[in-house]
């Protein structure tokens, strides 16, 4: 406790005020999470809590399922990511901002993960899609065209006590056990379509075919007319190509550098050349599995050493082969369109900024549920930045939004049974918070019915 007569002492050597600085206690409670009030407002405006409780009645436990989902999503947005971080929601004043009676103990939350995964995982997947639809409604309707981009990510685990921690493909720490989840996004809008959690020994394409069929059906049901799929070389297989043909979608599928592929390429043609630098860009158009195989290659001239004959040797600096069934697209355009989908790595990085995968439990379903909660936190933040903040905030990553908005300091005070959140005068985030709250209050469509 701070005594009323504590002070730091005068500073006569400092240019400016020489007065002592007194340290006093005051009414109310200081919180470093004042900006989370917009998350509370958005959560209620979307009707997420009511929707969850209306469908999760089978989940046992003392706490309502909507509370467990909400507090973990808030923890990720606040900056935590482990169950041991849950007490921060109590100590930092977050509980009072959201009106929770109490914050469950970390052990209680861990038990809830294990016993509720079978019900909550598919439920959160449906809720995530509803949030995508709601965001599109807020923006004026579903996009006419959408490109599904998905890529796996490796989360290193130390030890084998986390369920699903298996040794598999691990470029970060070869030989270490890991988890191998598979997120999917809409390229044009940045919306998260979900995450499929998998053990570390799962192949990159495991489960992708069936999931793609479900995602395509959802997008078509939402009114998207043109659907494309962009996949990297880890998904390359004849089965994947056949499935996308059967789904009637356009696709760009990168091919690994297999030796047998040379027999399917067409003749090389020079697309661009720089004689001064001794470089050229070549393209080829062939056929693989009944679809066009578009190839691009950059190479440079290798000059002879002193005393050697000039044999016009060339060195390949870049090569790529992309099967594509998109109309009359050329090799260079196909390669550029494929590269545009590399933004999926940034989206996965944003999940990492929300501490996705930081913690894991000794239960397969519990680990899958943790990733589903992380995807929900990402989409809620995406609704906030794309529809409520808008402008340049659309490109701000979670770490920036947390620093500049969500972690704004404030004082929580109570008077006449009314709780208030007071910000200091001149707080940079205050005007922005007010604008966002007005946008949420007046700019959202009706909540999702329970």
Image (cartoon, rainbow, N blue to C red):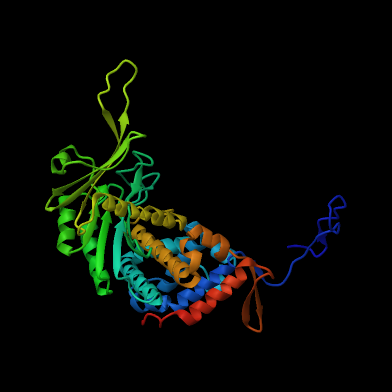
Q: Percent position (x, y) of residue 330?
A: 23, 52
Residue at horizontal 45 percent and vertical 72 percent from the top: 387
Q: In the displayed structure, does residue 427 sit left or right of residue 281? A: right
Quarter of the rendering occupied by the N terminus: bottom right
Q: Percent position (x, y) of residue 230?
A: 27, 56
Question: Which residue sits furthest front?
Answer: 276
Q: In the displayed structure, does residue 11 sit left or right of residue 441? A: right
**Residue 101 in view:** no
The image quadrant of residue 128 is bottom left
Tell which of 61 and 276 is nearer to you: 276
Quarter of the rendering occupied by the C terminus: bottom left
User: Taking 38 as reference, is 212 above or below it?
Assistant: above
Q: Percent position (x, y) of residue 308?
A: 29, 17
Question: Which residue sits furthest left?
Answer: 290
Residue at horizontal 77 percent and vertical 65 percent from the top: 24
User: Taking 319 as reference, is 71 above or below it?
Assistant: below
Q: In the displayed structure, does residue 360 sit left or right of residue 11? A: left
Tell which of 19 and 191 is nearer to you: 191
Q: Percent position (x, y) of residue 337?
A: 30, 55
How many badges with numbers are in the image? Answer: 0
Tell which of 421 and 212 is nearer to you: 212
Residue at horizontal 37 percent and vertical 50 percent from the top: 162
Question: Which residue sits furthest right?
Answer: 12
**Residue 95 in view:** yes
Tell which of 302 and 149 is nearer to you: 302
């Amino acid at each position: 406790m701070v005594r009323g007569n504590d002070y730091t002492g005068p500073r006569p050597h400092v240019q400016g005020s020489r007065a002592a600085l007194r340290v006093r206690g005051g009414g109310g409670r200081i919180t470093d999470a004042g900006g989370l009030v917009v998350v509370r407002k958005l959560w209620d405006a979307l009707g997420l809590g009511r929707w969850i409780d209306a469908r999760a009645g089978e989940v046992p436990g003392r706490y309502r399922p909507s509370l467990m989902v909400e507090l973990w999503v808030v923890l990720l947005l606040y900056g935590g990511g482990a169950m041991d971080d849950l007490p921060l929601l109590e100590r930092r004043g977050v509980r009072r901002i959201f009106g929770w009676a109490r914050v469950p103990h970390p052990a209680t939350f861990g038990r809830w993960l294990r016993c509720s995964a079978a019900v909550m995982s598919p439920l959160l997947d449906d809720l995530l899609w509803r949030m995508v639809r709601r965001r599109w409604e807020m923006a004026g309707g579903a996009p006419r065209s959408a490109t599904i981009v998905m890529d796996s990510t490796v989360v290193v685990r130390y030890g084998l006590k986390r369920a699903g921690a298996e040794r598999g493909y691990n470029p970060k720490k070869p030989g270490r056990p890991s988890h191998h989840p598979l997120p999917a996004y809409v390229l044009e809008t940045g919306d998260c379509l979900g995450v499929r959690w998998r053990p570390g020994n799962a192949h990159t394409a495991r489960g992708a075919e069936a999931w793609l069929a479900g995602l395509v059906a959802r997008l078509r049901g939402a009114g998207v007319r043109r659907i494309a799929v962009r996949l990297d070389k880890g998904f390359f297989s004849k089965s994947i190509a056949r499935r996308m043909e059967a789904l009637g979608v356009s696709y760009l599928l990168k091919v690994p550098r297999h030796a047998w592929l040379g027999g399917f390429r067409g003749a090389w043609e020079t697309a661009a050349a720089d004689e001064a630098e001794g470089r050229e860009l070549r393209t080829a158009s062939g056929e693989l599995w009944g679809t066009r195989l578009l190839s691009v290659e950059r190479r440079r001239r290798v000059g002879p050493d002193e005393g050697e004959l000039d044999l016009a040797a060339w060195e390949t600096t870049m090569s790529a082969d992309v099967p594509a069934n998109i109309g009359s697209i050329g090799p260079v355009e196909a390669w550029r369109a494929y590269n545009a989908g590399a933004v999926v790595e940034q989206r996965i990085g944003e999940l990492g900024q929300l501490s996705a995968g930081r913690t894991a439990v000794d239960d397969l379903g519990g680990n899958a549920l943790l990733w589903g909660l992380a995807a929900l936190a990402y989409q809620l933040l995406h609704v906030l930045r794309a529809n409520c903040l808008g402008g340049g905030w659309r490109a701000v990553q979670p770490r920036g939004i947390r620093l500049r908005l969500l972690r704004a300091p404030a004082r929580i005070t109570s008077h006449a049974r009314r709780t208030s959140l007071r910000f200091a005068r001149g707080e940079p985030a205050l005007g922005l918070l007010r604008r966002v709250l007005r946008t949420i209050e007046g700019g959202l469509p009706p909540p999702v019915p329970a």
